[in-house]
Image (spheres, rainbow, N blue to C red):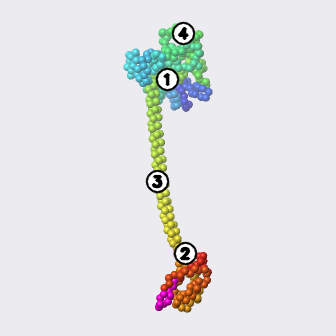
Amino acid sequence: MMFPGWRIGLDIQAEGVRAAAIQWHRQGWQLRHWWYLPFPKQTLADGMLPEPDTLREALAAWRTEIPVRHHLRVGFPAQRALQRQIPRPPRRLQESAQEKYIAGATARQLQMPTEQLCYDYLAEDSSFCVTAAKQVDIAALQAFFASMNLFPRTITPGDKILSALPQDCYPTDCRFLVHEERGYWLWASVNDRERSGWLDKRQAVDFPALCQQLEANACDIAFSHADVEGSCPAGAERLNAWQLIVRQQPPLPRHGGLLHARIRAGPGIRTLMMPLINLLPWRQLRRRHRLKLWGGTLLFGVLLITGVMLLWAQFLAVKVHWQQVQVSQWETQESALKSLLLRQQTELKESQQRQAILRAETVRKGNISRWESVLNMLALRLPENSWLQSVSWQNESAIISGVAGDARELERFEAVLADLPGAFKVKPGELRDEKQKGLVFTFTLNPQGGEHAE
């Protein structure tokens, strides 16, 4: 029977154990199973806890029927718990200090050491309503359930379980909730949830006596009982803890159907509600849980910040490394570009030098070709007693040096120069008379308009 998420209520009585299991579905609460597990021998008085061996023998087969995933709530005999009113301290205390104050005041009233008490409390306007039990009883129950691999969420006295029932289980005009067991009554106030308790049937032998003890009329009481053959007293309303169960399925009780189920498993069903009192140290566990939660949150925040910082540092390191790689690449590229530019500049300079040489050679050849015809014509027309010593040219001009026999020869030579083909401007240069040679002359020929005839 592996139905996950069962909520199981277990109620320990003198004659046996009652239990019920429900599970939440979309339509509401569904009954999964109910049990009545009698003890082998009836040797307990009301309010006494059974021996571990007796309880283990009764629950051995039941333990194999419940699923692994479950929420267990245990009903504790109300006779084993005591209630006290503790006045509030004169000033507001923190929760831990307030619990120490309540524990100390309760221990003084009960004349017991604080270490021997398990307690829980409800806060009123001017006082605390404290419910306490012996620590040895709670520890014995916890040890027994732990030996069967069961770990209750709550351990609650029976009268406080009554206080936890919602209003759907009884009429709205009721003042008290009452449940009758074999030898005692459990009662709880509807209007004052802190007021609850139990009465021995030697103090209130029947229902009218109970009404007198509670100072209430029968119509003010919602009633349930554990007797199979019992009936609801005249004038009292029915307390139906099964009102919350929307879906019910077999196995159902053999006697009385739903009525028998309410009778036998009613106290177990009541333990499924969230109780007002829990004798387990849930407040300390809640503080530890909060401390762990805050510690875990703080640790997670520190780890998150550290992780973000590490990621950011890694990102910055990668970015710096990437920038360094880029700078290195840029430097390499720049060096390569500079080398290429220098090589290209060198090649360009060499090319320019070669072109300059070629241009000079072209100009020289052009000058030679230009003056060749002029010089040939000059050689043909040269006077007999005149000769040339040197001919040189620079750019577009030619410098002619020679010797003439006399002045007449010089004039004839100058006339020849003037009659040369092309438009030349004849500019006389140096002239000296050497008796042995004759008249040494120098003329410069400059093309007029920058051009001359070929």
According to the picture, the residue beneath numbered tag 2 turns out to be: 359
For residue 112, which quarter of the picture? top left
According to the picture, the residue beneath numbered tag 3 turns out to be: 324
- Amino acid type at mark 2: Arg
According to the picture, the residue beneath numbered tag 4 turns out to be: 216
Who is closer to the viewer here, 398 or 235? 398
Q: Nearer the viewer, mark 3 or mark 1?
A: 3
Q: CA distance from mark 3 to mark 2?
A: 50 Å
Decide which of tag 3 and tag 2 comes sooner along the chain. 3
Q: Nearer the viewer, mark 3 or mark 4?
A: 3
- Amino acid type at mark 3: Gln
Decide which of tag 3 and tag 1 comes sooner along the chain. 1
Say the numbered circle drawn on residue 74. Answer: 1
Element under disc 2: helix
Decide which of tag 3 and tag 4 comes sooner along the chain. 4
Q: Nearer the viewer, mark 4 or mark 2?
A: 2
Q: Residues within 10 Å of mark 3 (few under 14, many from 20)?
A: few
Q: Nearer the viewer, mark 3 or mark 2?
A: 2
State whether residue 146 is above or below residue 159.
below
